[in-house]
Amino acid sequence: MMTPEAYFGTGPVVMASAPGRVNLLGEHTDYNDGYMLPCATPQRTQVMLALADDGHHAFYSASLDEHVRFEADQAAPPGFGRYLEGCIRLVEEQGADVPAVRAYVCSDLPLGAGLSSSAALEIATLRALRLLLHLPLDDVALALMGQQAEIRYAQVNCGVMDQMAASLADEQHMLLLDARTLQHALLDLPNDSEVLVIDSGVARTLAGSKYNERRAEFEQAARLLGVASLRDVLEPSVVEGLPEPYRRRARHVVSENLRVLQACAQHGPALFGQLMAQSHASLRDDYEVSIPALDALVALLSAHSAVYGARLTGAGFGGACVALCRKHCAAKAGQDVVPRFNASGHKARMVVPLA
């Protein structure tokens, strides 16, 4: 792995960072114009920039130990460089003249765990470009640009939650986000609680293909119901007349939106935990994005005396689980659960709180 000093020779001109995100409630609702409650991870991605003098963009990822170099008016090759190129192109679309740059990327976010490492990379890159070029762009604008960079340059048809969380969330609060209006507010975590995140160690091998399949299913469900989006369905019973699998897909989205709104009423950690348990059951049975390993990890977490509730977080088919725990008890709960889960041959690790 190359150090920043070795890569730049002197030093970077600017540096910026952005966190990952863990979603407490509101899964697979952002591309349905719905509601969600993410918070930021303590792990972050950092991007350092310096000007290049050879007309080429050059990027280095310390996590991957991988170099990318291409002419500034050409496309980046497939891989992590497409995310950075997308951010540069979106800034250029704002009318800015982006010179050839050298970028050094480092991160302590686990890859493939469902904690939005790609969104953290996009927002960190855009923040660095904002500093370098003195751009008058606010944090919501950066989030929307990051989303478009991922859709258009990484070919991931994502919603906006991950980029909004990376741009606006912090570790001490939940970010209530309305994907339709982009209205947002920082809310306190439930009283006497803290967040635990465990990376299951199971790679999300089906997440991409199944994600696109689920999007097509919810779009068809909305058409069958005659609404622009499932956000417009306010009562779960409305979807019961749909054919399968559209009935179950729509029921998840409608009920998940209601769970987020109920959680925002601040009824306490016990109810919040119950809503997380309901969310996981819905993701498992109605949206069908869980797998046996995640179900087993959620069951172990849910049985722990310090845990109010637990669920998978992220796209599903592997990745991480999140739990709401009693204050000052999350680390101990993680230390208890991870070895029991790994006794079945898994390679899970606790990622929040930091060891």
Image (tube, rainbow, N blue to C red):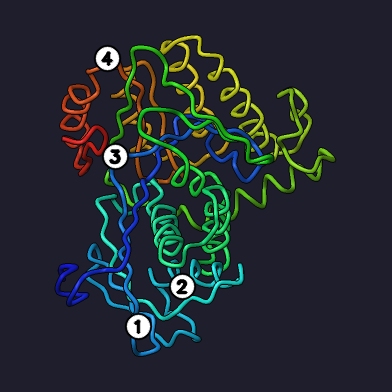
The Cα–Cα distance between marks 3 and 2, rounded to whole angstroms, is 26 Å
Mark 4: give few (<14), some (14-19) or many (20+) Cα within 10 Å.
Answer: many
Q: Residue at x 14, y 74 (%)?
A: 6
| Residue under label 2 | 85
User: Looking at the image, which residue is at 52% across and 54% down?
Assistant: 142
The image position of residue 12, as x and y in percent, is 26, 68
**What kind of element bears circle 2?**
helix
Q: Seen in the image, is 101 located left or right of residue 266? A: left
Q: Which residue is mark 1?
A: 69
- The amino acid pointed to by label 4 is Ala
Task: Name above or below for residue 112 compared with residue 230.
Answer: below
The furthest residue to the bottom = 54
The extreme right residue here reads 226
User: Please, what is the three-letter code of the amino acid marked with disc 1?
Assistant: Arg
> Closer to the camera, 8 or 161?
8
354, 240: nearer the viewer:
354
The amino acid marked with disc number 2 is Glu
What separation in Å lies between label 4 and label 3 (alpha carbons)?
Answer: 21 Å
Quick one: 201 or 192, which is closer to the camera? 192
SS assignment at label 4:
loop
Q: Which mark is residue 306?
A: 4
Chain-order first, disc 1 or disc 4: 1
CA–CA distance in space, label 1 to label 2: 11 Å
